[in-house]
Image: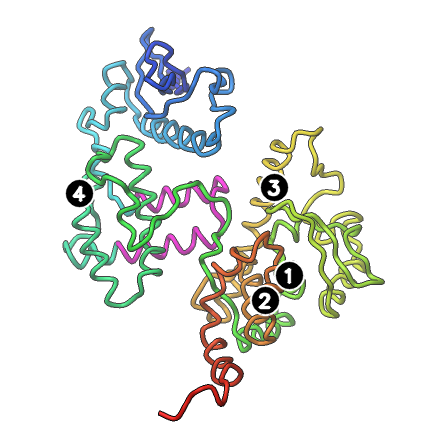
Amino acid sequence: MGRQKREKPQGKLVIRKNRINAKGEAPVNIAYFINGKTIQRSTDIFVAFNQWDAKGQQVVGHKDATRLNNKLAAIKRGYDEVIEQYDGYLTADILRKLLDGEAVDGRPNPKKTDFVQYALDYNRRRYDLSKIGYSTYYNAERYLKKFKRFIELKRGESAIPIAEITLDLLDEYKVNRLKEIGKETMNKELTPIIKAISYAVQNGLVDAAKFGNLNDIYIGQSRSYSEDVGDKEDDIHYLTKEQMQAFVDYYSKAKFNRTREIMDMFLFAFHACGLRVSDIATLEWKHIDFEKKRMEKRLVKGKNFHEIHLNQYAIAILNKWKAMNKNPRFVFDLLPVDFKLESDGNREEADRRLKMVIASKNRTIQQSLREIGLKLGLDFGLSMHVARHTFAIWALNERDISLHLVSRMLGHKSIEATEKNYAKFLKDKVDEVIAKKATFDGCLPEI
């Protein structure tokens, strides 16, 4: 019988009750127990005693509990991975060096890891954990590969150690890219780089003081570092009439029924006033009034009650699925019949469980749509959110529907959200209206 492999120590998040700051908060550390010794490292997160659940190792009752718990989980995961990759005999001294990012027994120093590969791995890990949607993951990968090409041209090497990433280098990259793209696109391309730097800072691979406020790296605006789930609405991609026609034409050419079913969902989302994928998944037959051609349901994201008219195309898709009789409760059979949208009054737990299930289904849907988009020659990742954007932009520009009404159709709680995302697409329409309808005769003396 061979020698049994020694188990690696698992990190535990603990609160240091003997290190209280002026606000009455104590630091949360990550602790490892090895050979009778406890080795701790700071996470730089402070909370009050009554905001720490020792058993669950998480922050509770704090206004930023979700963000702080995500950060703690990322820190713990980073340390655990470093330890797991070490295959020698682990002692307390070696563990300390690993946690501090030092080289051990001639093994590579984690700080010398290629930054771009580190960022690509982190991006993939966030996607696998359902922290981001497929479109966000796909675009981030593209942006990181562009940064890699810049590094290759500048250094003549395909890799750059994490420790050699500097603000000067990022400024040079911005100057280089701004010759070809605008500021808004530049900020999008910087996002996965900045998130990877932030993660490296959390894991002690980069000195935080070296970068100051990471938001300052963006051009002319600050951005949020919240761990987003799903795609952000500022990534506006939509189908032109020609692209939509190509999508419809592909329907009969698709090899698999499942592909056509996913295309049904995309088209229904478009025709049903840009429904999000979460509302496609949770759409029940009881939400549909076929006689009045209406849909009434509470939206998943905003929790607001939403009522819309269903056009003939949306009704046709529903009739097709009704005849298929796949699921007596959920229209598009993305959730099991007995799935509980409520959890014994625990709304937070129910939302968490629903989000996980939808994220899992969404990955399959987005992968299928992306493959369709590639076959159609689209220069962006096709996703369910593209259906929402396409509806909004077509409604504003093709049908002259007011921004106020489009906001209601989309289920936004306020017109400000609609304005933020789509007002920029109205420039040509505004110019046209001013030229044709907002010119008033007789209101200027002879000059």
32 vs 438: above or below: above
> Which residue is under mark 4?
164
Q: Earlier in the sequence, mark 2 or mark 4?
A: 4
Residue found at x 39% / y 18%: 7
Q: Earlier in the sequence, mark 4 or mark 1?
A: 4
Q: Please report the bounds of the magenta region as a residue range.
A: 118-147
Q: Earlier in the sequence, mark 3 or mark 4?
A: 4
Image quadrant in which you'd find residue 11: top left
Q: Earlier in the sequence, mark 1 or mark 3?
A: 3
Image quadrant in which you'd find residue 234: bottom left
Q: Secondary structure at mark 4?
A: helix
Q: Nearer the viewer, mark 4 or mark 1?
A: 1
> Which residue is under mark 1?
409
The quadrant the C terminus occupies is bottom left
Does 128 appear in magenta? yes
Q: Amino acid at mark 2?
A: Phe
